[in-house]
């Protein structure tokens, strides 16, 4: 692996350069809120190794604690890189702006630029107007209120993605590593991510026409952020048009709107919402478009086009939530969401619009006219569309019904196989399977590998 300095990574030949490293930490925190310093690697990427003494790790930790303000608590560890001992400092901080040795710096490429008084003031105003303290405030929930299956799934996904280096352990240790706990109390961001009873809601509806006069279906979803992402994604996939491609040896169902773009928009709407605003996130499926609404203002000094066409660093309103979603690989890369949505839609020739509105931020996907006829068709109904005659009737076949059909046809069907057949994420399939088991519709006979499904009703 070739190491290279960038806006979030600093390389140092040894701990003799600790002062310069601390300046880099302050600069990176002020720009990106997170980063890493490697001691034992030269700035050209060559691994030289770091000589270790009895107190080396302690001395590095103390130097950072003494000279970065507000204080941070980085992970400092010895790692073998190219067969040599190196010290890796991974850090994050979300409390305003940070000074190093009493001065303020900002990362610019591989350099640390000292800020003037005017620049410091502008940086304070920027963070004050967009990044706010809600996520770092202590909630009324303790670590005993978290949903353990969600934590297990989060750790598993993060480890598979190579973004989490620790295994599942006690919730307190995990939340300490994620900076989501204070004592035994969860921070608000931890409550939103891992507690079912957190007050969050996504409202979703299908409308018969181009306005909100007549609805065909309306739902309200509650749960932790990971559950809301899955439920919202599943809802959209069930209520858009799909067409069957029979040109190959296997039937392939293709959505009218790229599902990856829809998921990215849902994740962005939840990650960057204003959690102090009592208004819910909303998904509205109209005859001609799909709108995903987020009750949170866009960064005041930017336009959506800046993130679509440029390569700007991320500006997360809720840094701790954004970091957790990055670790679980729900976020591919910081600051790339709008660009990825735009690129996916461009490939499929789908028009998408990003709009700042008074009450928040709106992503609109315009549905292809040739595929939308009297209403919103469900997956598998292709070009026909739905009549929309029965108000409240769900227009698409339910995911559960499709899973039952596939399991009846092939009791040995795997979760991955169901995911591929239905065009839903593995987590979305698992969520439906759990629900169907609770309803007594199916059961698993035998182990995950070598077992089979049995339909009970």
Image: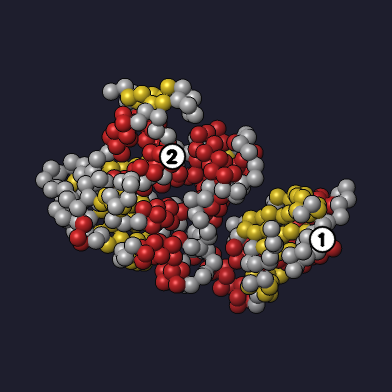
Count the labels in the image. Answer: 2
Query: Residue drawn 32% across and 50% down?
Result: 248
Residue 53: % across, % down: 88, 50
Instruction: Name the residue at 33% across, 47% down.
Output: 249
Relative vertical location of residue 364 with respect to residue 81 in this rendering, above or below? below
**Quadrant housing residue 185:** top right
In x, y percent, where is residue 64?
A: 75, 57
Residue indicated by mark 2: 416
Name the residue at 31% across, 56% down.
257
Residue depicted at x 20% and y 44%: 395
- Where is residue 311? Give x, y as percent: 51, 70
Image quarter in which the N terminus is found: bottom right
Report the side of 364 relative to 447 (left or right): left
Horizontally, is 330 left or right of 222 in the view? right
Q: Which quadrant holds residue 172?
A: top right
Indicate which label's residue lies in the foreground, 1 or 2: 2
Circle 2 packing at 10 Å, graded few (<14), some (14-19), many (20+), is: some
How many angstroms separate mark 1 from mark 2 (CA)? Answer: 44 Å
- Give SS at disc 1: loop
In the rendered image, which residue does mark 1 sit on? 48
Can residue 279 be seen?
no
Compare residues 445 and 259 and report the one nearer the observer.
Answer: 445
User: Residue 436 lies in what quarter of the image?
Assistant: top left
Q: Earlier in the sequence, mark 1 or mark 2?
A: 1
* Viewer-nearest residue: 208 or 29: 208
Residue lying farthest to the right in this orientation: 53
Q: Within 10 Å of the Cα at label 1, are there few (<14), some (14-19), or many (20+) other Cα atoms?
A: some
Q: Tell me the quadrant of the picture where the C terminus can be found.
A: top left
- The reply to whether the C-beta atoms of the residues labelled 1 and 2 are less than 8 Å apart is no
Foreground pick, 314 / 49: 49
Residue sitting farthest toward the front: 249
């Amino acid at each position: 692996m070739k190491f290279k300095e960038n806006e979030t990574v600093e390389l140092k030949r040894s701990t003799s350069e600790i002062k310069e490293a601390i300046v880099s930490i302050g600069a990176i925190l002020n720009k990106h809120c997170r980063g890493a310093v490697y001691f034992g690697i030269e700035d050209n990427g060559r691994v030289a190794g770091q000589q270790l003494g009895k107190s080396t790790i302690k001395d590095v930790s103390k130097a950072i604690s003494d000279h970065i303000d507000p204080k941070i608590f980085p992970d400092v560890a010895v790692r073998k890189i190219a067969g040599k001992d190196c010290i890796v400092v991974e850090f994050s901080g979300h409390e305003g702006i940070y000074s190093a040795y009493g001065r303020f710096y900002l990362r610019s490429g591989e350099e640390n630029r000292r800020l003037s008084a005017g620049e410091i003031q502008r940086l304070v105003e920027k963070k004050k107007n967009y990044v706010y303290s809600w996520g770092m405030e202590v909630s009324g929930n303790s670590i005993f209120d978290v949903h353990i299956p969600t934590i297990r799934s989060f750790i598993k996904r993060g480890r598979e993605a190579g973004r989490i280096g620790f295994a599942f352990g006690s919730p307190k240790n995990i939340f300490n590593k994620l900076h989501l706990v204070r004592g035994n109390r969860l921070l608000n961001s931890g409550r939103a991510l891992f507690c079912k009873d957190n007050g969050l809601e996504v409202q979703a509806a299908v409308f018969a026409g181009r306005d909100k006069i007549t609805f065909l279906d309306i739902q309200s979803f509650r749960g932790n952020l990971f559950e809301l992402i899955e439920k919202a994604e599943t809802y959209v996939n069930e209520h858009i048009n799909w067409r069957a491609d029979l040109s190959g040896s296997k039937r392939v169902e293709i959505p009218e709107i790229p599902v990856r773009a829809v998921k990215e928009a849902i994740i962005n709407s939840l990650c960057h919402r204003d959690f102090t605003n009592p208004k819910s996130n909303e998904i509205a499926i109209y005859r001609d478009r799909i709108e995903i609404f987020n009750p949170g203002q866009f960064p005041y000094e930017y336009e959506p086009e800046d993130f679509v066409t440029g390569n700007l660093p991320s500006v997360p309103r809720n840094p701790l939530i954004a970091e957790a979603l990055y670790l679980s690989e729900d976020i591919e890369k910081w600051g790339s969401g709008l660009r990825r949505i735009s690129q996916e839609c461009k490939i499929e020739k789908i028009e998408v619009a990003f709009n700042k509105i008074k009450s928040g931020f709106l992503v609109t996907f315009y549905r292809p006219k040739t595929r939308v006829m009297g209403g919103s068709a469900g997956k598998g109904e292709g070009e026909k569309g739905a009549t929309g005659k029965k108000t409240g009737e769900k227009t698409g076949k339910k995911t559960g019904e499709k899973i039952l059909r596939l399991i009846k046809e092939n009791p040995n069907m795997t979760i991955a196989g169901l995911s591929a057949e239905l065009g839903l994420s593995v987590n979305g399939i698992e969520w439906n399977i759990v629900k169907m088991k609770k309803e007594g519709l199916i059961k698993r006979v035998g182990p995950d590998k070598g077992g089979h499904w049995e339909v009970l009703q």
